[in-house]
Amino acid sequence: MVIGQALNRVDGPLKVAGRATYAYEHWDDGPPLYGFIVGATIGIGRITRIDTSRAERSPGVQLVMTHHDAPAQGSPDLSIPFEYWRAYPVLSSPDVHHYGEPVALVVATTFEQARAAAALVDLEYAGGSGSYDFAACVDQAYAPDNLIFGILPTDTAVGDLDAGFDSAPVRIDERYTTPYELSQPMEPHACLVVPDGEDLIVYVSTQIVDAARASIASTLRIDPERIHIITPYVGGGFGSKLRIHSETILAVFAARALRRPVKLALTRQQIFHLTGVRPTSSQRVRLGAQRDGRLVAIAHEVTMHTNRHSEYIEPTATTTRGLYAAPHRLTRTWLTPLDLPRGEDVRAPGEAPGLLAVESAMDELAHAVGMDPVELRIRNEPTVDPERGVPFSDRHLVDCLREGARRFDWERRPATPASVREGQWLVGYGMAAAIRGHFQAPTTGRVRLAADGTAAVQSDMTDIGTGTYTILTQVAADGLGLPPGRVRVELGRSEYPVSMGSGGSWGAANSSTAVHRACEALREKLVTTARNDARSALHGLDPAGAEFSGGRVSIGGVSEALSEIVARNHPEGVEAEGETLAMTDDPNYRDYALHTYGAHFAEVGVDADTAEIRLRRMLGVFSVGRVLNAKTARSQLIGGMIWGLGAALEEEAVVDPRSGAFVNRDLAQYMVPVHADAVEVDAVVLDGFDDKANVLGAKGLGELGICGAGAAVANAVFNATGVRVRDFPITLEKVLPGLPPMED
Amino acid sequence: MRSFTYERATDARAAVAAVSRPGAKFISGGTNLLDLMKLEVERPSHLVDISRLPLRGIEELPDGGVRIGAQAANSDTAADVLVRSRYPVLSQALVAGASGQLRNKASIGGNLLQRTRCPYFYDTAADCNKREPSSGCSAIGGFNRIHAILGASGACIATHPSDMAVAMAVLGAHVELLGADGSARRVAVTDFHRLPGDTPHVETVLEPREMITGVVLPPPPPGRQLYRKVRDRASYEFALVSVAVIVATERGVISGARVAFGGVAHKPWRSVEAEAALIGRPAAMATYRVAAEAAMRGAVGQGQNDFKIELAVRTLCRTLADAIQGR
């Protein structure tokens, strides 16, 4: 069995040798031109004058495009539930909707020429008065009409929350705030567009090939078949590349206008305004409990920002729906319209900010009732989904909690906050539960066996650094009984079978299931062929007992090499496709609640004098069904945990409320953890198999690591200092006033 | 494209002659200048590369001091045996800065001349008197968590980001300069940087075309040296507040004290007020607190950075206590 092994990344050698070619690095189509985006320097208003003459006269400039000469474009079709497939008009009007919005495109022979000329585009604006300050505008919040992602209700209620809460002897009623965050993948948002007759070849860093193609096509109002997406390697996405943005649309415009290949990449600074942002949120959490910690009421009410013209609802209030048992429940969502960049999915949309709030509140409850926080969670473990009443498919939250507590030596946790000091450090332990919905989406994969006995897997699925190439190699190797070295995986091209790409942690399960099914279909073809082939050793044998192993198929004691069957009967090769259903078509999603689970444990030191917070160690224990690759799984989980650490302590995009601009727009000032912040971080995955999820028993885990990780750190800060900070990130000035007097 | 020309200076005299061209600038490690050029904050038309001048030596002086060549790398200086043994506070400050890669590239002279990390300085769409005189200061009333609490003006509240210079301030270092006419002079490092006043774009006392050739450290004063940098993450971040101290005690009484702060002002901030409040007083937390409060007398927050005042007080107290107790 190859599935589950810690197989090294099959694309690893290419990447470390610099031979994995990313979107901006393709050169095969001749020397490209370079685009540079001119962004608005106001937050709201209208362009009243553009003078491009200086820019046009600048050396090397081939094109300056503004709303005056941009092509006509389609509008977003709001009936498409996932907005990544919708049109993305750019330079379509003189109106400015947020700071940094593209107002002109400059294309020149070199990048430096384009950038220099971009500074020469003269613009005048009539500025309006924008709303940029979330806290000042929360009174304008509205309840959205739309479902979240077209499938999830924004609000739910069970029982009578107010009555249940009011009657509870122990009540926690607190508000938690989370900041704007951005994905900031290492590879910026970049593309190369090559005109090919009437067609366009688009090398683009994107998570979903089909969505990129559809969005470009509907923006240009052309046949999607005219667009050929190529994205074999993607340097991280984290949600920000689920859809294409202005860089791709503008490169397409320029390539069509100039009939030349055009490259366009966002600068690190531009990424802050020209991709999506995790909405800032204000979350009220109410927990009503008996004195023994048993919850009777749980309410999670979230207000978040949305761009005024492009509604985005982060599924934050949904976080509590399947988490703990309580008879009286409420979740509610409001949106505060602001003139800021649009909200979009950022890793674990919903759970990441939601669990920061809810799992902090659970820690507050544990403190209030004097219970161990692990035991409090176990006490509130539901037997069925607490909102829908359906059984869980495969829930092991309690196992994660117990195993994590054991491995972490949780019993060493100081029961009293601010009671342990080691030298300059106030030491504290914290924990939090993790939960994340498991999603499924229609995906097709193709497996082709050649006459030489090697297999090729093809899908327009992407590998965004997660390990898709590797896990699909493993799935196909097991599926056909081949050594992994005889499987080649080909991804990220629009002529391959359509997948739902990488996103929502569904990529691995979707594509693995489809490839597994393709292998099943291919095995069926092969044994049928052999049975009917008079020259085959397996001729006439009953294929029911066929086994595939070592590149051979055997029935009873008789075997034949796959290569021989194929060479004789299908010298061109033989292929089959497999599919994964949409979750709406899969009865298991109706009959069961499908999630992944985990438990995070953190130990922090807080400097007793300066309030600097440093992680000492962190452990996550997870239940994700079956693991496809132990190494890539662990890497993803650890990466998520470290992001959670950053979300708890460091990460925040700061808006200047006078301009609507993100101020700290580089990675020196938009703080994320460095290696020295995350010295000892470990992730453990429990053995498992979720037979309701799919035939492989595997569920996605790319986003699970961040879920709850930040709350464990926040709770450790409380345990260390006795200071509860509800406004994330927990920077030192929020802890400083609560520190003890200084000692000699 | 904003073209510029480039030449590599062959000796120090040639360098100061070459930089007399209009729009010319020296480039050393380029760890800050190149970023600023990409953002069009700096727009030199000619670069004179001085990184290969024979100014990399670190040598002992007859009086027991040390001279560090202006082109010595930050990493080489931090690792130097003389520096580590006599000026540990300087070595500590250097390794607290930037990352390993940047320290390998950045020079001592360039470190002194690095520009502020105020985000509005880096944003050509924002108002910044330092970048564009008389345009205004967006940091005042804006995002100013990392900004100055001492010595700021209505024109500028930026800080000088160097760690190294803070250590040099307590060590009484002098900056060696070579003028355009070939004349050499020395300036105390504490006089080298200016407060912003009405001219925040004039950051140092360097004359036009003057070049830093080295830094001279006098023999170390008696006492323990310690550098402490406070920041949000464990590495690769500029100081919210930093403190360099050299403190000596005799029978429980402070006999010598030098104190400087980083991250709080437009220059490394030597505090004679704190030093005066320490010398002759018992080595105890109460003394440190009085001294730290003396250092912060006149400190003004901008809102988001108000916490820095108490943070600076606490950081100085802890650093003094640690230095005196040999921690």
Image (cartoon, coloured by chain):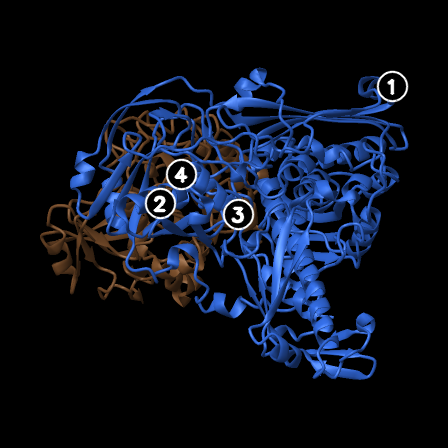
Chain colours: A blue, B brown
Asked if labels 1 and 3 share a chain, the reply is yes
The Cα–Cα distance between marks 3 and 4, rounded to whole angstroms, is: 15 Å
Residue topped by disc 1: A167
Asked if labels 2 and 4 share a chain, the reply is yes
Few, some or many residues within 10 Å of mark 4 (<14, 14–19, 20+)? many
Quarter occupied by residue A564: bottom right
Label 2 vs 3, first from the N-terminus = 3
Asked if disc 2 and disc 4 are in contact, CB closer than 8 Å, the reply is: no
The mark lying in front, picked from 2 and 3, is 3
- Comparing A546 with A155, the one in front is A546
Q: Which mark is residue A210?
A: 3
B248 horizontally vs A484: left or right: left
Position in image of residue B71 (x %, y %): 28, 60
Label 2 vs 4, first from the N-terminus = 4
The Cα–Cα distance between marks 1 and 3, rounded to whole angstroms, is: 52 Å
Q: Which mark is residue A251?
A: 2
Say what amino acid the circle numbered 4 marks: Leu
Residue topped by disc 4: A220
Tell which subunit mark 3 falls on: A
Which residue occupies the extreme top position in the image? A139
Tell which subunit mark 1 falls on: A
Tell which subunit mark 2 falls on: A
Position in image of residue A2 (x %, y %): 70, 70
The mark lying in front, picked from 2 and 1, is 2
Tell which subunit mark 4 falls on: A
Label 4 vs 1, first from the N-terminus = 1
Say what amino acid the circle numbered 1 marks: Ser
